[in-house]
Image (cartoon, rainbow, N blue to C red):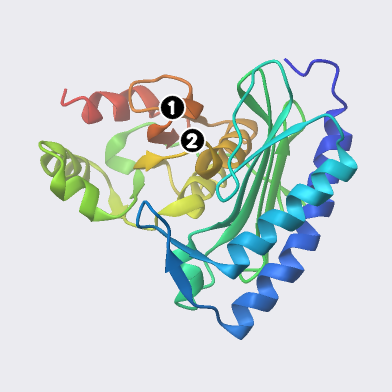
Amino acid sequence: MSLGLDLPRALAGAVEIAEEADQLSLAHFQAGVAAVAKPDGSPVTVADREVERLVRRRLSETFPGHAVMGEEEGGSLDPAVPTWVLDPIDATKNFIRGIPVWATLLALCVEGQPVVGVASAPAMGERWEAAAGLGARCNGEPLHVSAVDALSDAHVLHGGLDWFRRTEGHWAMLGTLADRAWRTRGFGDFWMHLLVAGGQADIALERDVQPWDIAAVACIVAEAGGRTTTWDGDPILEGGGVLTSNGRLHETAMAVLAGR
């Protein structure tokens, strides 16, 4: 899987680059930035673009020969080439409204699977990191998913309600989850998946996700003992819907999402 890569070195390099990105992104956040709309209607700021340029430059210096795929400047996932997958500012809408829940996400993918993941949220004072076989940590402390094994005891997190409302059958499906779960909340973006990794939540689901949204957090969740797939159980980097769980509840959650 690792193609002979030195994963501890890759993780250390990713953390070092994230620290540099944090200084730049936090300065923009504290100063305040305006956003413009991209062709797909999503917002982008000068911080998104500057952070991506910085991270790409540092990756090329630290890991020559590796490819990069980023939200703002593109790229692709080639299974034959180790590829860094980058979201310079995940949760840009939070960022532009002064909400501190946003992060730079950086993952190394090998053969289509994330083997290193870093999620750095400097306005929250949090950094999560993991590498395949090395475990997951938040601010240096080990992360572990929960042991909850009944949906009736589960804390379920979801993304924005707009997608569920406009997609036939899914509003009712979300209602079924809410009825059967202990608690539901709409935290959204990277954070809800990392709350599953830390055991504060048990299931997280969202739709319309791109590889840069999920690669880093999927590695962290896996190393914390959890599971991340599409709603159908396929590999997550295919895009579309994403389901994260503590592993024990994954099949149960997939059944509800499938209307069973």
Residue 219: tell me if it is visible. Answer: yes
Residue indicated by mark 1: 248
For label 2, the crowd category at 10 Å Cα-Cα, with few meaning under 14, some 14 to 19 and many 20 or more, is some
Tell me the SS state at disc 1. loop
Position of residue 191 measured from the top left corner of the image (x, y, whole percent): 50, 54
Calculate the distance from the C-alpha at mark 1 to the C-alpha at mark 2: 7 Å
Residue drawn at the location 67% of the way across and 73% of the way down: 26
Q: Position of residue 214 (x, y in %)?
A: 52, 40
Residue 104 left/right relative to 33: right
Q: Nearer the viewer, residue 192 or 75?
A: 75
Q: Is residue 12 visible?
A: no
x then y, percent, for residue 241:
35, 34
Name which residue type carries label 1.
Arg
| As drawn, 117 above or below 231 | below
Q: Give the vertical position of 217 relative to 43 (above or below).
A: above
Q: Secondary structure at mark 2?
A: loop
Mark nearer the viewer, 1 or 2: 1
Q: Earlier in the sequence, mark 1 or mark 2?
A: 2
Is mark 1 in CB contact (under 8 Å) with mark 2? yes
Q: Which residue is mark 2?
A: 147
- Which amino acid does the dot numbered 2 rest on? Ala
Give x and y (percent) for residue 185.
32, 56
Name which quarter of the figure residue 116 lies in. top right
Write down the quadrant of residue 48 in the picture: bottom right
Query: Which quadrant is home to the N terminus?
Result: top right
Q: Nearer the viewer, residue 2 or 78?
A: 78
